[in-house]
């Protein structure tokens, strides 16, 4: 048995780390770099989520567009899209703007959003297509009431003509039959369950153009998405980022 003195030294040595973890847990601020900095003294290193990441390699894949960017901030805050009684499911602003900019930098035309909720990310995707001057956004959402809210939001912003809403589930045969056979961008933000995410990746990757991108939200915070992304590394080049609320975003590019 360790002497009482050395046990209390150990207790105090770890106290600061445990208090900081408690603060993060209470604040629900699971910021990846915070955890990565905190955990090594108390736990094994976090190494389950990797990326082939030289950030400049990703930047080279998406050179800036000479035509600049539209006014994404003019879309307004996510709070203006939703209703107080609905859950706070919108992606972070950095995610919405990243997706819009991706469409512009790659001059993408055909875009599918799986899980559009009240249309916050959809508005950024549609604004980017309008900026490019051509294209179509197909929004798949399983809850018809959310589609009505999203439709009203996109109409309010003058973006409705760029969007087709499909009520149903991402893997429904009837939905798949109505989506284009070749797609430039798929944004996947649905159940966050492992099995469903694995199937969605396989199903929609087969529709990606050779230069196409599959982007997943919540690839750090949600274990199911994280595991599916981890296993996708054999077939894709994987780029994972922390986002404002630590939810994480992953871009999958097909390996040549
Ligand atoms: C996290 S929210 C999407 C948020 C939205 N992409 C944004 O960032 O503003 C997830 C949405 O996916 C929908 N959903 C869940 N499972 C689905 C499925 N299998 N197919 C289509 N939509 C689904 C939910 O109803 C919900 O509206």
Image (cartoon, rainbow, N blue to C red):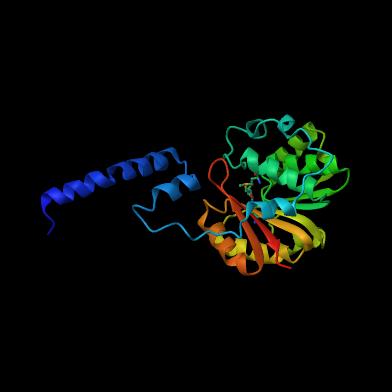
Q: Which of 2 and 197 is in front in this view?
A: 2
Question: Residue at left 33%, top 53%?
Answer: 42
Up-down: is 137 above or below 206?
Answer: above
Which quarter of the rendering shows the C terminus? bottom right
**Residue 163: quadrant of the picture:** top right
Q: Nearer the viewer, residue 22 or 150?
A: 22
Judge whether residue 126 can be spotted in this image: yes
Please indicate whether residue 160 sits to the left or right of residue 99 in the image: right
Q: Where is residue 96 in the image (x, y as percent from the top left)?
A: 68, 42
Q: Where is residue 8 in the image (x, y as percent from the top left)?
A: 17, 47
Judge whether residue 141 can be spotted in this image: no
Up-down: is 219 above or below 64?
Answer: below
Q: Which of 149 and 253 is in front in this view?
A: 253
Q: Position of residue 71 (x, y in %)?
A: 76, 32
Q: Residue placed farthest to the right in the image?
A: 133
Question: Residue at left 78%, top 37%?
Answer: 69
**Residue 216: quadrant of the picture:** bottom right
Q: How many marks overall?
A: 0
Which quarter of the rendering shows the N terminus? bottom left
Please indicate whether residue 34 sits to the left or right of residue 198 in the image: left
Please indicate whether residue 213 sits to the left or right of residue 217 in the image: right
Up-down: is 90 above or below 36?
Answer: above
Q: Where is residue 68 in the image (x, y as percent from the top left)?
A: 80, 38
């Amino acid at each position: 048995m360790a002497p009482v003195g050395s046990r209390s030294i150990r207790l105090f040595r770890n106290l600061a780390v445990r208090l900081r973890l408690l603060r993060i847990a209470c604040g629900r601020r699971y910021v990846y770099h915070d955890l990565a900095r905190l955990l090594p003294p108390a736990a094994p290193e976090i190494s389950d989520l990797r990326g082939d990441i030289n950030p400049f390699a990703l930047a080279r894949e998406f050179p800036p567009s000479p035509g600049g960017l539209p006014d994404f901030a003019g879309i307004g805050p996510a709070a203006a899209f939703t209703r107080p009684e609905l859950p706070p499911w919108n992606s972070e602003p950095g995610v919405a703007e990243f997706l819009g900019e991706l469409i512009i930098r790659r001059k993408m035309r055909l875009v599918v959003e799986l899980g559009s909720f009240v249309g916050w990310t959809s508005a950024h995707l549609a604004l980017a297509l309008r900026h490019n001057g051509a294209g179509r956004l197909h929004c798949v959402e399983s809850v018809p009431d959310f589609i009505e809210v999203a439709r009203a939001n996109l109409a309010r912003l003058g973006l409705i003509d760029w969007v087709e809403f499909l009520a149903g589930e991402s893997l429904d045969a009837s939905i798949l039959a109505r989506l284009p056979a070749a797609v430039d961008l798929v944004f996947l933000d649905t159940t966050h369950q492992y099995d469903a995410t694995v199937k969605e990746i396989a199903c929609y990757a087969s529709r990606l153009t050779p230069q196409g991108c599959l982007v997943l939200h919540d690839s750090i915070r949600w274990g199911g998405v994280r595991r599916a992304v981890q296993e996708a590394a054999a077939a894709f080049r994987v780029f994972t980022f922390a986002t404002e609320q630590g939810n994480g975003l992953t871009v999958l590019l097909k390996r040549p």
